[in-house]
């Protein structure tokens, strides 16, 4: 059930999360090699992990553009419909994330730190996150300094501003964080 895969993230345990941003299938798939044969094409090894149904806190136009595993079973999911990032975690172990306790707004773009679309995310070794917006040419650095599980305006800094005349970055689409 994969139409337009746009982003993928891998857990250390081998589970793969894929954001699908098609017009008909707007969800995040979870792939798990349950039979140990090295692939994920057997029945039951692919499931819809996150979708609009069962999550009224998501926009009616929910459109996942980027996913990033951040540890402890948590995955960040960027939504292009409102430029928000949600922190998702399957707390009850049923294989899907739904409800206000499992899908929580983590970053809500404000007027000071506005973005159009989160095109990519990357995690630094200190746990902070970089996000990029190709349209604005912006890379933001997000760091949950107070460890409350969300990002406030005070925890966001402009890392790259492609709108500045001296910027050599114009349209960032992907990010890679190197150790150190």
Image (cartoon, rainbow, N blue to C red):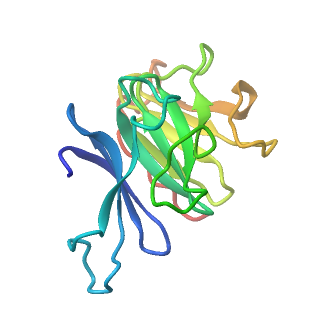
Determine the residue positioned at 60% across, 55% down: 124
Q: Quadrant of the C terminus?
A: bottom right
Q: Is residue 43 above or below residue 56?
A: below
Left or right position of 80 against 180: left
Q: Is residue 53 above or below residue 47?
A: above
Res 9 → quadrant: bottom left
On the image, the x and y values in percent for residue 27 come to 34, 43
Of 180 and 10, nearer the camera is 10
On the image, the x and y values in percent for residue 118 come to 43, 34
Of 27 and 83, nearer the camera is 27
Q: Is residue 72 above or below residue 39?
A: above
On the image, the x and y values in percent for residue 158 come to 60, 29
Determine the residue positioned at 60% across, 34% down: 105
Left or right position of 42 against 79: left
Of 128 and 26, nearer the camera is 26
On the image, the x and y values in percent for residue 111 come to 60, 13
What residue occupies the far right of the structure in this picture?
146
Left or right position of 67 against 152: left
Q: Is residue 120 above or below residue 12?
A: above
Determine the residue positioned at 54% across, 39% down: 86
Determine the residue positioned at 36% across, 30% down: 134
What residue occupies the far left of the structure in this picture?
3
């Amino acid at each position: 059930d994969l139409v337009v895969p746009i982003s993928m993230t891998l857990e250390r345990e081998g589970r793969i999360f894929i954001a699908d941003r098609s017009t008909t299938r707007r969800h995040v798939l979870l792939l798990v090699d349950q039979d140990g044969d090295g692939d994920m094409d057997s029945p039951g090894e692919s499931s819809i992990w996150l979708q609009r149904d069962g999550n009224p806190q998501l926009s009616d136009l929910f459109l996942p553009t980027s996913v990033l595993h951040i540890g402890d079973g948590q995955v960040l999911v960027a939504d292009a419909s409102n430029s928000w990032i949600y922190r998702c975690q399957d707390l009850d172990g049923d294989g899907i994330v739904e409800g206000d306790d499992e899908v929580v707004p983590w970053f809500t773009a404000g007027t000071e730190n506005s973005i159009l679309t989160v095109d990519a995310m990357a995690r630094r070794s200190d746990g902070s996150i970089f996000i990029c917006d190709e349209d604005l040419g912006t890379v933001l650095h997000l760091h949950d300094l107070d460890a409350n599980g969300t990002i406030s305006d005070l925890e966001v800094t402009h890392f790259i501003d492609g709108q500045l005349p001296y910027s050599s970055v114009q349209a960032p689409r992907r990010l890679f964080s190197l150790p150190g």
